[in-house]
Amino acid sequence: MPEGPSDLELRRRQFKAQMSTVQTRRQQAVCVRRAYKRYGTKSNPYVILDGLNMTVPKGAIYGLLGASGCGKTTLLNCIVGRKRLNSGEIWVLGGTPGSRGSGVPGPRVGYMPQEIALYGEFTIRETLKYFGWISGMTTQQVEDKLGFLVSFLMLPDADRLVKNLSGGQQRRVSLAATLIHEPELLILDEPTVGVDPLLRQNIWNHLVEITKHGRTTVIITTHYIDETRQAHLIGLMRGGYFLAEESPERLISQFGAESLEDVFLKLSVIQNMGKRRRSSILQGVTETIQVPSGTINEAAVIDDEVGEISGEFGDNVSMSSRGGRVSIAPEPTENAPPELPPEEEPPMTFADYFKIVKLNHMRALIWKNFLWMWRNAPVMAFIIGLPVVQTILFCLSIGHDPTGLPLTVVNYELDQSEVCKVTPGCNSTRLSCNYLHFLKNRTLELSFYENEEEGKEKVRHGKAWATLVFPSNFSDSLRSRINGGRSVPDWDLVTSSVAVYQDKSNENIGSYIQRDLYFAFEDFFKDYLSSCNIDTKVGTIPIRWETPVYGYGNPDFTDFAAPGVILTIIFFLAVALTSGAMLLERNEGILERSLVNGISGIELLSSHVITQFAVMFGQSAMVLIFSFYIFGITQNGNLLLVIILIVITGLCGMCFGFVVACSCDNERSATYMAMGSFLPIVMLCGIIWPIEAMHSILQWISYVLPLTKSTESLRCILARGWGIGTTEVYAGFVSTLIWIVVFLTISILLLKFKKG
Ligand SMILES: Nc1ncnc2c1ncn2[C@@H]1O[C@H](COP(=O)(O)OP(=O)(O)OP(=O)(O)O)[C@@H](O)[C@H]1O
């Protein structure tokens, strides 16, 4: 008894020819017309899609075949709305991908990219939960589907971490994540790579099963050409267009070939010859290898001459069979036609502006981010601990007075081999030694030499920072200078001074030595005057230093630098953390996958802001505790203001991190961008040196940098105890908030428009 038509054959018969109009194209699952896509520049284009037409009827399994690098993934990315065509049209499930109301990208589409695109630190269950949640499923629905997928795809225990699975198992988890929410359109980029033949057959059976009722459509790319025999339609892609778009059986029978591989080979030969010798040879070739009329895209063969590729080929019509125009489309049914998205994008209602985030998306994203942090606890501990380490290093190493600086002394007042000893009293003849005693108290290291040349030699060789030379009658001359009044001879004025030969190559050390010499002299002189019963005030310069209005009598560079350093640490660690997390997400393909599932740029950024806010809060708290309570950095202001300023600076850093991640394609360029911005910002925002000392043009640049105003503001709060009512203080808050808005806007625009 003859066997009846198989299930597959019955399904294929449903795809019947009809005229192609915009309305019929919108009825297809996917319809691509005159797609042109190039990479590279206009002057040096690398054309990937060159007038490609494609028609995928609803309920079909469409096998997309072509050599590696021919542009299959690019085409699929354009279909799911992640890449833009340079010209041409695409309808997906009746709408234009990316337009409002089309539902694409969104849960109507399931996209399995070529790369694994999963978090290695998640278990299979957690992975499916994440993708289920973002598609609007409940946890229970995910659990119900999980069991089926695990057994159908022969996955190991659902609580195994993805990173511990084999490559093939990981691909199957990726497939499960695409199937979990039963989308209307499944786009699978090489799902069967690394899958054993039995499971491959199971996957195909499953695809046949889910497409049976016409609700689900599948586009699948594969390198195993012959497995697409089970597809309803296959498109053979080469050189930027389809050589053929037909049912596999028809192709095989029309070409008299044994396999689809043979068909592809023959079509490729025809295309090559066409390219070499143009259409004139077409006839000969088709005669030789008996190519059936109406099968090949002749436009593809003779493209050089005709120029415009037939817009009708995607409707499964060759130029030679134009009379009998057909297109593959589902048979019109008695039932009402499927509901299509609106042709024009509906205008935004007032309420739409407030529906910028979906709760299920936010929940899934935040849960995923926290789970990632939890699974990477050592990394997170390092990230939270790093600012503390930086703060400790800063407080211990920057701004303190240098100690133990070596000086050489040549004292001609001493007899040969006499040791320099303190000799108290008004008539002391060793006042030089008394002065040197005060110098030693200021932690300078003194070493004595017999003559000036030897002392200077030490300075020249970098062994000492200065040499001091005391004249032989220093004490007597000094006394004469004090007692002589107007009649002091010039000679006594000269010999009562100490000559200093300094190495001033180091500005800071040079200044510290000068300061110590002055201060030590003041102390010595007061001591001397009191031993002579003279009022010590006579020995001071006639300027009285009263208690400072702000700060201390002996200013500390640590206090000056601390506000800028604290804000820089918080800002740049937030940059590193955010850009790192986003680049990881993007480079592993998870970002792309989430965006295809309908996650918006705003949702993605908001979820990162929320999760990393928690991290930043921890970082800020630790920095505050260490700076103010352990190292005692001056804090005269309102602590709440300090906390708010530090937190919004971290937020600003986070937003800059988004810009870095969105504008750089890999970690290396992100590192360059972060470094490239770090150094100028640190130099110009007044942390190291007062802005007033900069070149006037740089001062202007400095004022618009993100950390300048906030550093000044924090300094005013900490050192002066000013409140938010002061211009200098609120300017820091306003400038930081403006930068947050600027960075966020740039990131959202980059996420939206930076597509291929
Ligand atoms: N962003 C890009 N910039 C420049 N060239 C690109 C870019 N993406 C892809 N290409 C190039 O475009 C061509 C088509 O790439 P595509 O990934 O679409 O091929 P494919 O058919 O999917 O290949 P395979 O089967 O190996 O996955 C390749 O030569 C690739 O190098």
Image: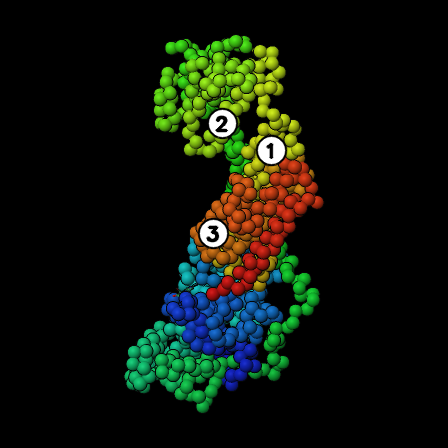
Residue at 65% of width from left, 39% of height from top?
717
The residue pinned by badge 2 equals 514
CA distance separating discs 2 and 3: 42 Å
The residue pinned by badge 3 equals 673
- Looking at the rendering, the quadrant in which ligand 1 lies is bottom left
* Amino acid type at image mark 2: Gln
Q: In the picture shown, does residue 70 fall above or below 172? A: below
CA distance separating discs 1 and 2: 26 Å
The mark nearer the N terminus, 1 or 2, is 2
Quarter occupied by the N terminus: bottom left
Question: Residue 137's x, y, as percent?
Answer: 61, 60
Question: Residue 480's x, y, as percent?
Answer: 51, 14
Q: Is mark 3 within 8 Å of ligand 1?
A: no
* Amino acid type at image mark 3: Met
* Amino acid type at image mark 1: Ile
The residue pinned by badge 1 equals 633
Mark 2 lies on a secondary structure that is helix
